[in-house]
Each structure stands twice: as C-alpha cells, then as structure tokens.
Amino acid sequence: MEPERTERRTLVVEFTQKADSRAAVLIEGVSKWFGTFQALDKVSLNVAVGERLVICGPSGSGKSTLIRCVNQLETHDEGRIVVSGAELRPGMRGLAEVRRDVGMVFQQFNLFPHLSVLDNCTLALRRARKIPKDAANQIAMEKLERVHIAEQAKKYPRQLSGGQQQRVAIARALCMKPKIMLFDEPTSALDPEMVKEVLDVMTALAKEGMTMICVTHEMGFAREVADRVVFMDKGAIIEEAAPQKFFGNPEHDRTKQFLKQLLH
C-alpha cells in the first residue's frame, strides 16, 4: 500500500508543477476570513496565459476579495496563489516585482487629484522603475493614446468625466507593462452613457491577447469577450463555463436565478 500512496503523491506534485508553468494565475483551495466572516471558501481557479475570465455574482459573494488576493491587496488565509510562476506569501521577497506584473483597475479611479493626467501615469514609472522623466512621458503618452485620451494629458482628474478618468486609470496600469490585468467592477461608478467607452477599451485589450480577470455585471461584455465566465456566491464558485453555455444553459438553480434577475 505504501508504494502506491507514494506514487500517487508524486503524480499530484508533478501535475501541480506543470499547471504552475502554464498558468498566468493559479488559485488552489483559497480561503479568506474577515473576523468570523468567511469571504472565500476553498476557491480554485486556473487562468491560462491570454485567457479572458469574467467573474460575476451577487454583492458580498467574494469576487472582489478574490482578485484583491491575486495582487495581495488582501492576504489569503488558506490555500495557495501562484502568479506568473511565483507563489504569493505574506511578507515574501519579490512581492513588489510580482505586483508589477499585475495591473489593477478599481471601481473608483484612485487618481491623484493634484497631479495632471500625464503625471498620474508617469509617477510609478519614475518612482518604482526609476525611468527618466522624458522616457516615462513617452511611455505614458503611448498608453493614453491607446485608450483614446491622449489629448487630455495636461488636464487634472477633476476636469474629466468619469469615463475619461477610468480610461486614465487603465492607461496608468498599462504603463507598467503588466502581464495580467485585473478589473474590479470598473464601470459600476459610471453613468450609463460612460460605460461603453470604458468597455470598448477593455474589449480592445482583450482582442490584443491580454490576460484579464474582470469582476463585472456587464453581461454583454462577458458574452462578447470572455473565454470563461465564473459565478460566485457566498465565497464559493458555483458554476463556470464558456459564455455560450453559461448564458444559454446554466446548470445550477442559483446561477439561473442570478441571470434571470440580471437580464430581465
């Protein structure tokens, strides 16, 4: 019996190592508590390089907590998270380098109000990457052009619409040349007429092959862009499937109920 158990254990280790090398993000059995409240309950996901993953679910389902754990804005209590081959641990060496590979765009734009659009985009380049100002400005202008807002470079955040500010936030994240982009309900704070301009930018990034994990209730975006849709509730993954199956033939009653409320 003992040799059989040893062989099985070896196979598990080998599979995990291979999964690490293929995955942009590997999440295995991750749990997270806030006091006595369990926000994540043994969540497991494998996000491939170049994959576009959309996570949806009701408020309080753990979806935002999950992606915040991916760049360690929140630390997980159990399980393991591997990003670009590096396992994330509290206090780990090299965490700053891993975070540079992961760009994040939040519900709120988090722009510095006292800095111009250009300076908001170049700050991390100059401070963290030690890139000279002229070179940083060139990179920032390229990214602002990419999100169709370069003409606003000299303005301040207060002079922009919400949709424009969110596009600046996306450009700022892109300036660090991330391998993975995380979006935490990036359109939820926008007026309806501004949602499309942000989703158009995200769609363009997806078509360029950017690895993306996006928490959103924008189901039209999920249908068009996602390779896979994940539905979470009460800190756990209830269902995951390709968009056609997820929207056309969901398996779980909780998913059906959620989609009925959202789409009607």
Image (cartoon, rainbow, N blue to C red):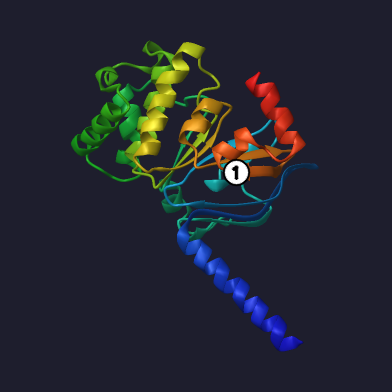
Residue at the location (44% across, 50% down)? 96
Residue 156 position, x and y percent, is: 35, 17
Badge 1 crowding class, 10 Å Cα cut-off, few under 14, some 14 to 19, many 20 or more, is some
**Which residue is labeled 1 in the image?**
241
Residue farthest along the front direction in this orientation: 249
Residue at the location (57% across, 42% down)? 67
Q: Tell me where residue 26 sits by quadrant.
A: bottom right
- The amino acid on which the numbered mark 1 sits, given as a three-letter code, is Ala
Tell me the quarter of the image containing the N terminus. Answer: bottom right
Residue at the location (22% across, 40% down)? 132
Vertically, is 167 above or below 91? above
Q: Identify which residue, 167 or 138, lies in the foreground.
A: 167
Residue 134 position, x and y percent, is: 19, 35
Q: Tell me where residue 62 sits by quadrant.
A: top right
Tell me the quarter of the image containing the C terminus. Answer: top right
**Callout count:** 1
Q: Is mark 1 on a helix, strand or loop?
A: strand
Residue 126 position, x and y percent, is: 30, 39
Vertically, is 17 above or below 69? below
Residue 260 position, x and y percent, is: 69, 24
Residue farthest along the right direction in this orientation: 36
Q: Identify which residue, 143 or 13, lies in the foreground.
A: 13
Residue at the location (41% across, 13% down)? 161
Vertically, is 245 above or below 26? above
Residue 260 seen in the current view: yes
Residue 112 seen in the current view: no
